[in-house]
Structures are given as structure tokens and as C-alpha cells.
Image: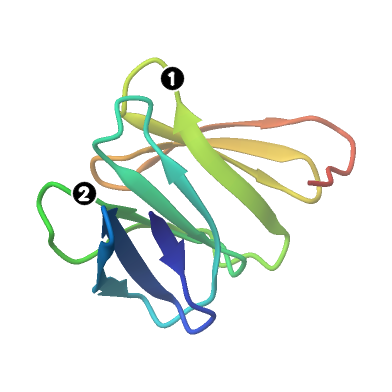
Amino acid sequence: LYFSAQEGILIFFHIKDLQYEIKICADISQPISSLIFSPDYTSLLLVTDQGTVYSYRPAHSGEAVKLLDTSSSCFLAADFLTPGNKYCVSVTISGEVQVWSLEDGTFLSKLNLGIEVQV
């Protein structure tokens, strides 16, 4: 079980039989608004409400890597663009849908829906 503390800490809670282990995986120092696993469960997106998206790979047990920073208070959500784990899609309150590369955080494309969006 992965969850985040309010301070921006990603925590792994492993339960086996009557034993459990708690491990701090990453500290991004920003409140995490959502955690999204890739379709193959190899990557985890950590999304903050400030518009920053981090990638964490549980099998590598490394630090979370900042992928993109939209620096927008209008940022609502992000998710993997399937199939595969190469792209991420984000949406803003104003209705702008953006596509990003997960390899280096490069902005690739956008589409304006022309309406406000709510989650």
C-alpha cells in the first residue's frame, strides 16, 4: 500500500500475515494530491496541486524524479496516456489538456476544450 502524508512524503506500508513494515520512499516537500500507477505497475506518478508531477519507480527504490512543473494554480490532475508508459496527460481548470513526455518532461502538445473542468 502506497500513501502520502500531508507534508509530501510517499510512504510504503507492507503487510504480510500479522507483520507489517513502514518505509519512507520519497520526500517531495509538496502536498501530494494524487498517486497514479502506470498500467503495468512499474511507475507511480505523484501529482501535487501546485502543478508538479514526479515519477517514482518502486522496483528501483530511488528518489522521486521531477518530470514536469506546470507552475499553475489551475492544475487539476495528471495521468498516464495509455497504452504504454511514455506519456502523461494533464488538465487545467480552464480546460487545457496537455501531453508530456515521461522520459524528460518535454511538453509535446495541448488541446483547449473551451470549457472549465472540475474533478
At 32% from the left edge and 20% from the top edge, which residue is drawn?
Answer: 84
Above or below 100: residue 76: below
Q: Which residue is mark 1?
A: 82
Q: Decide: few, some or many residues near mark 2? Use Cα within 10 Å; few <14, some 14-19, many ≥20.
A: some
- Compared with 112, 30 (above or below) is below
The outermost residue toward the top is 83
Horizontal side of residue 104 vs 36, given as left or right? left
Residue 118 shows which numbered tag? Answer: none
In the rendered image, residue 32, in percent from the top left (x then y), is placed at: 52, 68
Q: Confirm or deny contact between disc 2 and disc 1 (CB under 8 A).
A: no
Q: Nearer the viewer, residue 99 or 27?
A: 27
What's the amino acid at mark 1? Thr
Q: Secondary structure at mark 1?
A: loop
For residue 9, what is the image quadrant? Answer: bottom left
Q: Amino acid at mark 2?
A: Arg
User: Total label count?
Assistant: 2
Side of 74 where 114 appears, left or right: right
Q: Secondary structure at mark 2?
A: loop
Q: Nearer the viewer, residue 32 or 73?
A: 32
Instruction: Tell me where residue 85 sits by quadrant.
Output: top left
Colouring chosen for the image of the structure: rainbow
Q: Where residue 94 appears, x then y in whole percent?
A: 81, 48
Which residue is disc 2 drawn over?
A: 57
